[in-house]
Amino acid sequence: MPIEISNHSEYLLEKRAEKYSPITYLGTVHQGYCSVISKV
């Protein structure tokens, strides 16, 4: 069964924000993400 993207859009956006940027799709900073990215 295919995943309903509309039901998981927030999850996907949050995961993308965590993996690729300290800034979320809302333009706010998530605490802890910068420290994770800086180690990469």
Image (cartoon, rainbow, N blue to C red):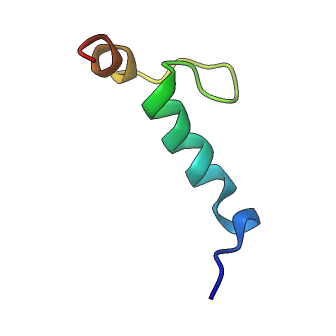
Task: Please give the name of the residue rendered at 44% of the width and 32% of the height, measured from the top-left corner.
Answer: 19
Task: Please give the name of the residue rendered at 48% of the width and 18% of the height, measured from the top-left corner.
Answer: 22
In the image, residue 27 above or below residue 12: above
**Residue 1: image location, x then y, percent:** 62, 89
State the residue in front, 30 or 36.
Answer: 36
Task: Please give the name of the residue rendered at 34% of the width and 18% of the height, measured from the top-left corner.
Answer: 37
In the image, residue 17 above or below residue 8: above
Task: Please give the name of the residue rendered at 29% of the width and 15% of the height, measured from the top-left corner.
Answer: 35
Q: Residue furthest right?
A: 6
Q: How many marks?
A: 0
Q: Residue furthest top?
A: 38
**Residue 36: image location, x then y, percent:** 29, 21
Residue 12 falls left or right of residue 33: right
The quarter of the picture where residue 8 lies is bottom right
The quarter of the picture where residue 40 lies is top left
Residue 36 falls left or right of residue 6: left
Residue 22 falls left or right of residue 2: left
**Residue 15: image location, x then y, percent:** 49, 43
In the image, residue 20 above or below residue 8: above
In the image, residue 38 above or below residue 8: above
Residue 7 falls left or right of residue 36: right
The quarter of the picture where residue 38 lies is top left
Q: Residue furthest bottom?
A: 1
